[in-house]
Amino acid sequence: MIPLNKHTIQHHLTAHPAHKTTTIHLFESIDSTNRYLKEHPETQALEVCCAETQTAGRGRFGRTWHSPFGQNIYCSIRTPIKTQGAALSGLSLMVSLAVLAVLDELSSHQDILIKWPNDLLWNGKKLSGSLVELLYHNTQITSIIIGIGINVNSSACQDNSLDRPWCSLYDIFNQHFDRNVLIARLIIHLNNYLNTFMREGLSECLPIWKQRDYLSEQWITVSTPNGLLSGQAKGVNQWGNLIIIDETGHKHELSSGEVSLRV
Ligand code: BTN
């Protein structure tokens, strides 16, 4: 397996303007790449932290992100930002689209889908997830940290230790990938999507979301801070909220929650 290498990642960035403003921090082992960037002094650069393994990788809802050594991508990107929280709603969706753009470069088959708000799935199995965190000074947001985990070269056939169905790029394409190239593409696409998002919000991204929405028209149950909600998924609105029509025909627009398909 090709090890991670800072210079190789930088080399694959050279043709892109993001190259000049990117600082890469690479570790053999770290507790969590998100945690590292949370505590690293803030700068005006795009700071990227990657590791071969994480000993305390974090997922959404307080879960652990399984991070076997040398196989997958565990990468966090921090960028300075001057905006209010409300303007950032939809950011998680934008991140999913940026990861999807990287994976779409590998194949013309568009069978990787997005599960709101930020999972990528193939055949209903989780391929990648992301965790967005905000840094504040007093009440002002100063930076965002986007942590991304992509299952690349590990194989679900050889490791069924996780309780939820998952898959990797290896499972999909039956070949191994150089993670350095994928990380460089991730930095480029995230940088481009972030710029578009800051200018125009989600509007430009919504048509792609519609084409690749795993939940569209599905009957689902969402676990929200206010309890369970069931209904039919009807896409997302311009702020990235999930639209659901419940059994009484009532429309709900959810900004957070964990979705499962109703069986
Ligand atoms: C999820 O789907 O629950 C989100 C998973 C996010 C995992 C990534 S791996 C790199 C970064 N560092 C972390 O500790 N978590 C994110």
Image (cartoon, rainbow, N blue to C red):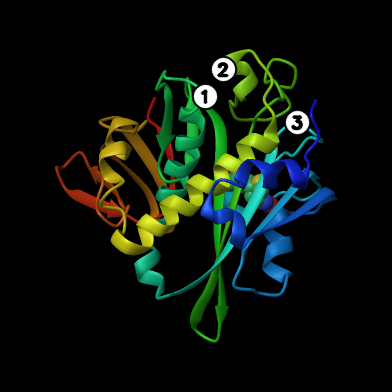
Badge 3 marks a residue whose secondary structure is loop
- In the foreground, 230 or 9: 9
How busy is the neighbourhood of tag 1: few (under 14 within 10 Å), some, or many (20 plus)? few
Residue at the far right in the pictured view: 28
Q: Earlier in the sequence, mark 1 or mark 3?
A: 3
Instruction: Please give the label number shown on residue 12.
Output: none
Q: Is residue 159 above or below residue 149?
A: above
In this rendering, is residue 198 above or below 19? Answer: below
- Residue lying at 52% horizontally and 24% vertically, measured from the top left: 106
Closest to the observer, 180 or 53: 180
- Could you tell which of marks 1 and 2 lies nearer the N-terminus? 1
Query: What kind of residue is marked 1?
Result: Leu
Q: How many marks?
A: 3
**Helix, strand or loop status at disc 2:** helix
Q: Relative to 195, is 183 on the left or the right?
A: right
* Residue 232 makes an appearance in the image: no
Q: Which residue is mark 3?
A: 71
**Residue underneath mark 2:** 172
Hey, what amino acid is under mark 2?
Answer: Ile
Residue receiving disc 1: 106
Residue 153 figure quarter? top right
Residue 152 figure quarter: top right
Q: Is residue 241 left or right of residue 34?
A: left
